[in-house]
Image: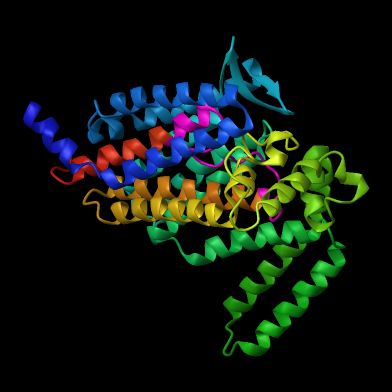
Amino acid sequence: MVKRNKILLRNIDWRIVVIYMIMIFFGCMNLYSVSPEKAEKQLIWILLSFFFIFIIFLFKPIHYKHITPFFFLFTLFLLIGVFFFGKNVNGSKSWYVFGSISFQPSELAKISTSLMIAHIMSQENIENNNKALLHISIILVLPSFLILLQPDPGSSIVFSSFLLTLYREGLSISFILYFLFYILLFVVSINLSPWIVILLLFISFIFFFFLKKNISFLDLFFYIFLFISFSVFSFLSPFVFQKFFKQHHKDRINILFQNEFDRKYRDNVGYNLLYSKTAIGSGKFFGKGYQKGTVTKGKFVPEQHTDYIFCTVGEEWGFIGSIILIIFYLLFISRIYFLSERQKNIFGRIFGYSVGNILFIHLIINLGMVMGLFPTIGIVLPFFSYGGSSLWSFTVLLFIFIRIDASDQTSLI
């Protein structure tokens, strides 16, 4: 037993563990600049996360495969239960609150869905397999739809990261391009007249026909179907936007196409973005120095300890510090992809890619939010933002994969 544990420890990828440790403690340092009280709590949660890591390593990878379906169903029950027993926080009923302890089941859903996707796809190949693709679609739609209803569109969007995992396993790039195009079409349609959008679509389709040769009748039928579906979607988008989106969600999207300096947004929904950009810009090349950020010290950014923690880095550590942090993240995620690709076990490979893609989507959207390239939708910066639920979920995701990788080097179980 002792020998086996020594082998397991030797097979752990310590490079990724070291990067993890650097990021969580550097994140805690930046939190201390924003709020010493919250940094102290975060440090407690960091220490508790080591307990979760210990528990993770008590299980073998085969155990994770066996409990995955039950874990996934348990998560769905939690997501449904939050509508009845959850607490409304910032307009979203997405938290369970027990005294001073709060818990967001959507964080648990990222773990269970990653495991479930790996469980199904390790048994069924999705390439040219409509049945397997249907199973995967149901697994993805159920938690993301329940989270969207809370409403928590930010956490729901994170589930789009699994499309990258599916692409690695054989899903046609067309599915991802269609998905991205529908998002683009939705955003454009709520800011322009649907008739203008349809005219642009029609011109694009005509232009495409002139470029493409030897179009069959089946191709023609397919393109006409696409044009009709895009047109209908364009007409429905403004209605859906006005009817089902809350006002603060509408404002956060509209502000991207207007200006946070506009009086309509400057003192409310645009306030965070305005001072986030101010903080990042004021840091210039080398930054103002640790705990010397005037915007940070003045607490001008209300959500600076969570969604907007990166603006603290920009102000105190400047362009150089921000770039170094981003490079660390990219090295970290690249290492996860590398370890995923070398897995002998399909389950480990798919789960590893899911972990890497979730972190990648969080990174891209969070950086886009603080710089005004993406709406503010409550996406945290992994291992950096304040919060026990997010820290623990990312830690559990990462170390389940590290546990799987360590065993994969010696055994498939």
Does residue 155 lie above or below 81 as drawn? below
Q: Nearer the viewer, residue 56 or 17?
A: 17
Q: Magenta stretch: dominant SS?
A: loop
Give the extent of the magenta segment: 370-394
Quadrant where the image shows the C terminus: top left
The picture quadrant where one finds residue 101 is top right
Quadrant where the image shows the N terminus: top left
Q: Is residue 378 left or right of residue 198?
A: left
Q: Pinpoint residue 143: horizontal percent, then vertical percent.
A: 54, 36
Residue 1 makes an appearance in the image: no
The picture quadrant where one finds residue 206 is bottom right
What number of labels is visible? 0
Residue 33 makes an appearance in the image: yes
Q: Pinpoint residue 372: horizontal percent, then vertical percent.
A: 72, 53
Q: Pinpoint residue 268: horizontal percent, then vertical percent.
A: 84, 38
Q: Pinpoint residue 177: horizontal percent, then vertical percent.
A: 57, 64
Q: Nearer the viewer, residue 285 or 69?
A: 285
Q: Nearer the viewer, residue 222 or 382?
A: 382
Does residue 182 lie above or below 289 as drawn? below
Q: Residue furthest right?
A: 263
Q: Is residue 258 left or right of residue 128?
A: right
Q: Is residue 223 left or right of residue 117?
A: right
Q: Is residue 196 magenta?
A: no
Please give the name of the residue rendered at 40% of the width and 23% of the height, measured from the top-left corner. 47
